[in-house]
Each structure stands twice: as C-alpha cells, then as structure tokens.
C-alpha cells in the first residue's frame, strides 16, 4: 500500500486565452477550439510577447524567455505538498521527478529540484511522458518498503509550452504549463492510500507521440485520442469491477475536455463525479491529473474513492485507486 500524505501544484501567471491564439493568425478561433478540445485558457512560463513575436521558432531561446525554470516550479509545487503533508522538508528521503520535456537531460531534474529545495537526498528521474505520475506510483509500489525511506517526494515539472510550435494550430491550442508534487510513503499511514495501481505499455506505438531532443511536440492526433479513450475506459471498468459500491470520482489524463467527456459517456460517469481542470489550464502533461487531485483535495471525505487514470507517449497507460479514511 502507498500512503498519500500531501499533494501540491503550481501554475505560472501568464495566460494564453483563445483570443490570443486567434490573434496569432494560425487559422483558429474560440469556436473552433471549444468544439474540438474544450480548452478556454492555459498558463505558460513564456512571455506572451515572446510567443507573439517569435512563435517559439527557436527552441534554444525558450528557456531564456521563461519566467521560471523547471527546478523553480518543481520547488514551488513541492513546498505546497510538503506543507500539506505536515512534515519538515528534511524528512524527505528520496526525490523522483519526471514528465514530458525535461529542461536538462543531464543532470536528472530530480537533482536540480532537490538542490532548489536545499535537500541532500537520493534523487533520480523516472519519465513516462504524460503517465509519469502513474509510473512513479507503480514503481514505488513494486519496491520493498523496508528498502525505502519514510517519505518520498514525487514531482512532475511540466513546462511544455517551450516545445510548442505556435504556427501549428493543432498543437498550440492544447498545451499549458503546470507542476505537480506529492509526498508519499510505504511505511507511514495517512488518511489517503493508493490501494490499487497498474501500468501497461504498447511500445510499438512509440512514434504516435514524440518530442524530439531538438524538436517540437508532435502527435497523430485522432489515433492518439482514440487510443487514450479506449485504454481509459478499459481501466475504469477494471477499477469499478474491483471496487463494487458507490462509483468513484474520476480523474483522467487532462489531454482535452472532448476526450474526457467521451470517456465519461462510455463509462456512465456522473457529471458531479468527474473532476478536471483542462478547460482552464490546458494539457499540462504528467502534472495534469495529480494537479486536479491537488485542487480538489479538501472535498474528499472518509469512504471516498478516486479512480485516477493517465495515458502517455510510449504508448503507456496507468491507473490507480485512492481511498480516503478517517
């Protein structure tokens, strides 16, 4: 069992709304965006003037044009998670980071985040694109609890607008920036616990979603959306079969609202049980689903269950059940 002690999130200040994208003159407008992806606004670490002037053509300049580094957003989300866990940061014994587009390939971003936090702990990256949070939970869940420290910090710094081509309306409308963090333990009990977790990969589909080392994000949009819907529906059905009784809250991969609503129709998820933030923050990669969990943390009561299901490049998908007790 994996106990979830605290969770946190951070979003930058700059807002990309649909009018901004329409003003870029890339063949899109609010109606087109809302019909296809249901996203109204997104946050970005980039200057809006920079996007407007350059359309982000030079990826090497994107970091210099950013208001925050991944290490900084990782620290801000982690500080919130640590505070919510009610522990001192010095109690963290391991830091695992991961997401879609690390700012550095070497060193591991976990090390830069740990340094930003002032922590001298073991730190490494475990990346599985948008399913990184699920992969990290699954990985920790397979380890011997006696070999782990009391508290582990998971961080997904996802500032992916740096790898968006703002001349491409198909991808420009999707992405926003956000960072999630979670304090977990396999040894110290908490009111929230991951009681089931799973992860599966389909490596033959790796070409369908890519971010090259020196290139922009790209995907086979319709094929990837169909895949994500199918895998999410299957995982949700597996979860409700394992856990009969009142239906769980559902948090899916925050790819786009159209995809999530399609899953809810197929799974008969009631509107009040569907938790999401993609309409306001865009697709924030691996941080999307855990950020939704963080924003809704106070609503969960004893007896509640959450089915959190994510899908990412690879192709990989992961699911978990989080149960709340007194």
Image (cartoon, helix red, strand yellow):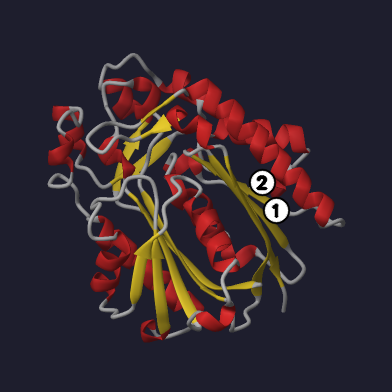
Mark-to-mark CA distance, 1 and 2: 6 Å
| Residue 172 in the image, given as x and y percentages of width and height | 34, 28
Give the quarter of the figure containing the C terminus: bottom right
**Is residue 265 shown above or below 170?**
below
Query: Disc 1 or 2, which lies upstream in sequence?
Result: 1
Q: Callout 1: 10 Å neighbours few (<14), some, many (20+)?
A: many
User: Which residue is labeled 2 in the image?
Assistant: 274
Q: x and y percent of residue 72 in the render?
A: 25, 62
Residue 47 as seen in the image, left or right of residue 43: left
Q: Is residue 111 above or below residue 56?
A: below
160 to the left or right of 36: left
Q: Secondary structure at mark 2?
A: loop
Rendering coords of residue 103 (x, y %): 25, 50
Write the residue at 40% across / 37% down. Answer: 41
Image position of 225 with respect to 160: above or below: above
Left or right, 28 with respect to 163, comes to right
Residue drawn at x 51%, y 48% is: 131
Residue that label 1 marks: 249
Q: Is residue 111 visible?
A: yes
Disc 1, SS: strand
Location of residue 69 by image quarter? bottom left
Quadrant housing the N terminus = bottom right
Task: Please name the residue shown 82% across and 55% down the image.
Answer: 242
């Amino acid at each position: 069992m994996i106990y979830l002690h605290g969770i946190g999130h951070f979003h930058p200040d700059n807002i990309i709304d649909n009018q901004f994208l329409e003003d870029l003159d890339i063949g899109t407008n609010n109606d087109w965006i809302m019909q296809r992806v249901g996203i109204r606004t997104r946050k970005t670490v980039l200057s809006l003037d920079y996007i407007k002037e350059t359309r982000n053509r030079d990826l090497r300049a994107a970091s210099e044009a950013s208001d925050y580094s991944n290490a900084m957003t990782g620290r801000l989300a982690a500080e919130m998670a640590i505070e919510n866990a009610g522990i001192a940061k010095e109690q963290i014994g391991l830091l695992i980071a991961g997401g879609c587009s690390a700012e550095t390939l070497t060193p591991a971003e976990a090390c830069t985040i740990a340094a930003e936090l002032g922590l001298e702990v073991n730190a490494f990256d475990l990346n599985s694109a948008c399913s990184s949070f699920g992969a990290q939970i699954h990985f920790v869940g397979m380890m011997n609890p006696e070999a782990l420290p009391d508290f582990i910090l998971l961080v997904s710094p996802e500032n992916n607008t740096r790898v968006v081509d703002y001349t491409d309306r198909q991808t420009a409308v999707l992405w926003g920036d956000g960072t999630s963090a979670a304090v977990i333990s396999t040894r110290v009990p908490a009111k929230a616990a991951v009681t089931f977790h799973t992860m599966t990969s389909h490596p033959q589909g790796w070409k369908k979603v890519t971010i090259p080392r020196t290139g922009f994000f790209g995907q086979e949009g319709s094929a990837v959306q169909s895949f994500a819907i199918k895998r999410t529906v299957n995982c949700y059905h597996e979860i409700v079969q394992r856990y009969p009784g009142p239906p769980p809250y559902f948090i899916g991969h925050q790819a786009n609202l159209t995809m999530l609503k399609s899953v809810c129709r197929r799974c008969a998820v009631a509107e009040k049980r569907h938790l999401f933030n993609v309409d306001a923050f865009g697709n924030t990669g691996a941080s999307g689903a855990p950020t939704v969990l963080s924003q809704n943390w106070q609503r969960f009561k004893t007896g509640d269950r959450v089915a959190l299901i994510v899908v990412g490049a690879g192709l990989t998908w992961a699911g978990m059940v989080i149960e709340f007790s007194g």
